[in-house]
């Protein structure tokens, strides 16, 4: 069975399987060696993402474990049976790519998505802890939100909403940078790998148009940069595609007269 690499994040992850997307590029890089699983949820912040953890990354528990609680302060006990451990192996690696929505500003059009920066860091910590509880050996990579081009966001809003478009930006690059900083600090504190996308993109002159399509989401070049950075981190760890075997023999290794021999030992 091929190992899985799960991409967990917001719309920037959800869109990553589109043509030219960074997730699709990872699938090509790890073709026949690992399965890239897209678990991106457009519009989500880290607060909402916590509700998905037990569904996307179920914990392995002993049969018969169960817990109870009093429902609505009544004498009726509400019981829930813990899920059984199935035969599915946990992912070998996961990227956690949130923050673009958490950094939405209060009092602006996207304030419903806002999560205070301190809570954002705590939510990321809870997410990493859950993944490590799911599998202590899982390679976890935190990715900071990308920078925000405020002028690009305004232009996009005007193109969609016309005169009803927002006057003030719903996100700013300065505030998003605070979230990126907390993401990186957490990675260092708990000892997981990270990609500083917020800083990396801004190293390139004209990053606003080169990497961002609407001031927030990625152009093909922006997707290419994410793929480059994620692949670099994987290679520096133990998940280099070049060093991984195929799941089954390459066709050149199969003897036409004696094909069984090539399949006697499965690569993975």
Image: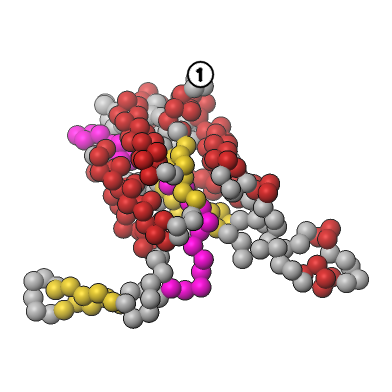
Q: Residue at x 41, y 56 (%)?
A: 132
Pick whichever, 229 or 161, lies toward us. 229
Pointer 1: residues within 10 angstroms few (<14), some, or many (20+)? few
Q: Position of residue 70 (x, y in %)?
A: 14, 73
Left or right: where 39 falls relative to 54: right
- Element under disc 1: loop
Q: Residue furthest right?
A: 257
Pick whichever, 45 or 159, lies toward us. 45
Q: Is residue 79 above or below residue 197?
A: below
- Range of magenta residues: 85-108
Q: Residue at x 63, y 50 (%)?
A: 30
Residue under circle 1? 205
In which quadrant of the rendered view does residue 181 lie?
Answer: top left
Left or right: where 24 falls relative to 168: right
Pick whichever, 17 or 45, lies toward us. 45
For the stretch drawn in magenta, what is the main secondary structure?
A: loop
State the count of labels: 1
Q: Residue furthest left?
A: 74
Residue 168 is a magenta residue: no
| Residue 113 in view in this figure | no
Q: Position of residue 29 (x, y in %)?
A: 64, 47
Q: Position of residue 66 (x, y in %)?
A: 28, 77
In which quadrant of the rendered view does residue 153 lie?
Answer: top left
């Amino acid at each position: 069975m091929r190992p899985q690499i799960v991409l967990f994040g917001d719309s920037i992850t959800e869109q990553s399987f589109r043509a030219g997307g960074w997730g699709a590029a990872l699938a090509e890089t790890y073709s026949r060696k690992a399965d890239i699983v897209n678990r991106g949820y457009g519009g989500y912040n880290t607060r909402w993402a916590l509700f998905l953890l037990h569904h996307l990354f179920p914990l392995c528990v002993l049969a018969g474990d169960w817990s109870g609680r009093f429902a609505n302060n009544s004498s009726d006990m509400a019981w829930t049976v813990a899920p059984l451990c199935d035969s599915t192996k946990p992912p070998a690696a996961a990227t956690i790519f949130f923050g673009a929505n958490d950094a939405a500003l209060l009092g602006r059009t996207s304030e419903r998505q806002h999560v205070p920066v301190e809570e954002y860091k705590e939510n990321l910590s809870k997410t990493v802890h859950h993944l490590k509880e799911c599998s202590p050996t899982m390679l976890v990579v935190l990715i900071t939100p990308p920078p925000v081009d405020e002028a690009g966001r305004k232009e996009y809003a005007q193109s969609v909403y016309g005169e009803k478009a927002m006057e003030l930006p719903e996100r700013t690059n300065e505030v998003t940078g605070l979230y990126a900083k907390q993401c990186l600090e957490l990675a260092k504190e708990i000892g997981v790998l990270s990609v500083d996308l917020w800083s990396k993109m801004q190293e390139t002159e004209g990053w606003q148009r080169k990497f961002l399509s609407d001031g927030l989401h990625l152009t093909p070049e922006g997707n290419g940069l994410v793929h480059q950075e994620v692949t670099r981190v994987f290679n520096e760890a133990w998940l280099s595609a070049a060093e991984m075997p195929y799941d089954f023999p390459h066709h050149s290794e199969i003897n036409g007269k004696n094909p069984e021999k090539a399949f006697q030992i499965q690569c993975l």
